[in-house]
């Protein structure tokens, strides 16, 4: 049996842009992606704290150090600039793997810089 477990989380990421005319996805500062161990094109779940919207998409890397969090395509309808998001990535694990796994949780400040790292 395999379990779906939290692997990574970006907590309180602020939307910096929204581009409706785009093929879709969420652009994330590539430095944040690396630190959170989220790979390019990895499936993510996004929860908008401001309006309760939740959606699945995939992560695409933005400019390193930019703090960019951009809603693209249909996701641009799920929030607006300034909204706070929680971005989750999950992994499929055996019970043994899940017992040892510790998710990477990055708590971000208003400029999308890491304020705290939880494991």
Image (tube, grey):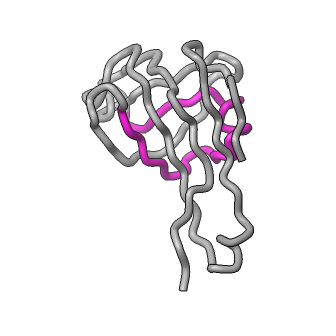
Q: Give the percent coordinates (x, y) of residue 94.
A: 63, 79
Q: Give the percent coordinates (x, y) of residue 8.
A: 61, 48
Residue 48 location, quadrant: top left
Above or below, 89 against 36 in this view is below
Above or below, 45 against 5 in this view is above
Q: Give the percent coordinates (x, y) of residue 33.
A: 65, 37
Q: Is 35 in the magenta?
A: yes
Q: In the drawing, does residue 31 fall left or right of residue 73? A: right
Point 28% across, 31% down: residue: 78
Q: Is 51 in the magenta?
A: no
Point 64% across, 47% down: residue: 39
Q: Give the percent coordinates (x, y) of residue 30.
A: 66, 31
Q: Which residues are magenta?
A: 23-48
Above or below, 73 against 39 in this view is above
Residue 23 location, quadrant: top left
- Classify the position of the N terminus by image quarter: bottom right
Task: Specify the farthest residue to the bottom.
Answer: 1
Point 69% across, 72% down: residue: 99
Q: In the drawing, does residue 59 fall left or right of residue 54? A: right
Number of dots carrying numbers: 0
Choose between 85 and 18: the one closer to the eye: 85
């Amino acid at each position: 049996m395999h379990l779906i477990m939290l692997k990574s989380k970006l907590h309180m990421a602020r939307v910096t842009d929204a581009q409706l005319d785009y093929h879709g996805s969420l652009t994330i500062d590539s430095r944040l992606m690396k630190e959170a161990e989220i790979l390019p094109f990895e499936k993510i779940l996004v929860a908008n704290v401001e309006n309760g919207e939740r959606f699945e998409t995939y992560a695409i890397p933005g400019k390193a150090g930019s703090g960019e969090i951009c809603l693209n395509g249909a996701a641009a309808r799920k929030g607006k600039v300034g909204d706070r998001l929680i971005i989750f990535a999950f992994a499929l694990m055996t019970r043994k793997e899940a017992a040892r796994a510790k998710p990477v949780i990055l708590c971000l400040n208003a400029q999308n810089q890491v304020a705290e790292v939880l494991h």
